[in-house]
Amino acid sequence: MASAAHTRIPAEGLFGAGSVSWRVHADPAMGLAGLRALLLQALHPLAMAGVAEHSAFREDPWGRLYRTASFIGAVTYGTGPEVEAAVAKVRQVHLHVRGTDPVTGLDYRADDPHLLTWVHCSEVDSFLGVTRRSGLRLTDAEADTYLREQARVAHLVGVPDDHPVPSGTAELADYFTAMRGELKLTPAAREAARFALLPPLPTWVQFATPARPVWVGLAGLAFAMLPGWARRMYGLPGWRLVSPVTDVQARALRAGLSLLPRTVKEGPHLRAARRRWSTGAGEPAPAARAGAEGPACAEGPAGAEGPESAEGPEGAEGPENPSGT
């Protein structure tokens, strides 16, 4: 059954200033979360095949990341018409993304509810998990609320209304346990991981700025924030000691990013939403305002993702991102 959720988008948008989605997606750690989502998504061979065969991530990695992040910004902070336009674009792109995975021999299509759910869950697990581990204070009830809010986005990009989408942290954990048998580190996933670690940079940026070592450090941290079983699939240590050390590093990164001026850390969708809610719908609640001051990770290149989307649901080009880093 095709999803009908897109017919019920309020004029003011999907979420308000008091939503948990606003707080999570505006957090300074979202860029890191987006990278982690891409690495996790790449472990599904069919999702990765769609990205490898239909995405322009090799030719235009930064443009792809920006488009994916822009989608997340639009559906999180945009008005109803802006959400509808972003969703319609993604669904249209998905109609043309299909093929056969050279590793498993299985057919794939970007609008497959099973793959859309995988991309969605990889994203929300990364966005929620990384921001909390980096210092965003959310109760368990608020975490469940976030997943319920985001489940609506999954249905908007094509997951049928009668197809289950995890709406709580316990359900999400069970989902990943059930999916592990389908996952595989394919040659395409290895390539995407290398690309995420060492993306092409303009010559002057590479040699005249510290961008390369900074990016390598960020990507390395994203790898370390994967669950132990996923790290092991990439050939990395899966020791439990990695997590507490990584959390300390992530908290330090978030603290540093929080010091950036708003003009740097807020994307266009977030800035427009803050103006709209303070002048047209009243002042956002204090907690919401505090949460909406992180970087535009949900909107800028850092907000989304590498192998993750081809840009699929939430990104705009492959089976992956149904949500979509």
Image (cartoon, rainbow, N blue to C red):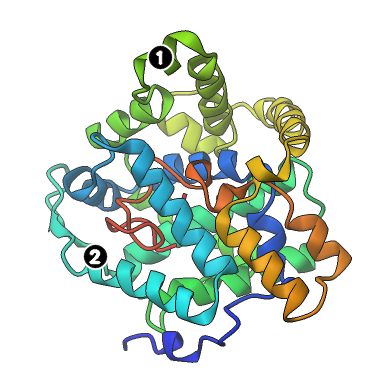
Contact flag, marks 1 and 2 (Cβ < 8 Å): no
Name which quarter of the figure residue 13 lies in.
Answer: bottom right
Residue at 43% from the left image edge and 39% from the top image edge: 39
Mark 2 sits on what residue?
Answer: 93
Point 19% across, 50% down: residue: 54
Image check: 144 left or right of 50? right
Q: Which residue is mark 1?
A: 204
249 on left or right of 201: right
* Residue depth check, mark 1 versus mark 2: number of the one nearer the observer: 1
Which numbered disc flags the more N-terminal residue, 1 or 2?
Answer: 2
Q: Nearer the viewer, residue 93 or 154?
A: 93
Considering every residue shown, the one lying at the far right of the view is 286
State which quadrant residue 174 falls in.
bottom right
Q: Which residue appears at 12% of the width and 44% of the height?
A: 102
Residue nearest the observer in this picture, 253 or 12: 12
Name the mark on residue 68: none
User: As drawn, is 279 to the left or to the right of 25?
Assistant: right
The percent position of residue 235, horizontal first and vertical second, equals 42, 24
Could you say whether the residue bearing mark 1 is in a helix, strand or loop? Answer: helix
Q: Give the crowd class for mark 2: few <14, some 14-19, many >=20 residues within 10 Å.
A: many
Tell me which amino acid carries mark 1. Answer: Trp
Q: Amino acid at mark 2?
A: Val
| Number of numbered discs overlaid on the protein picture | 2
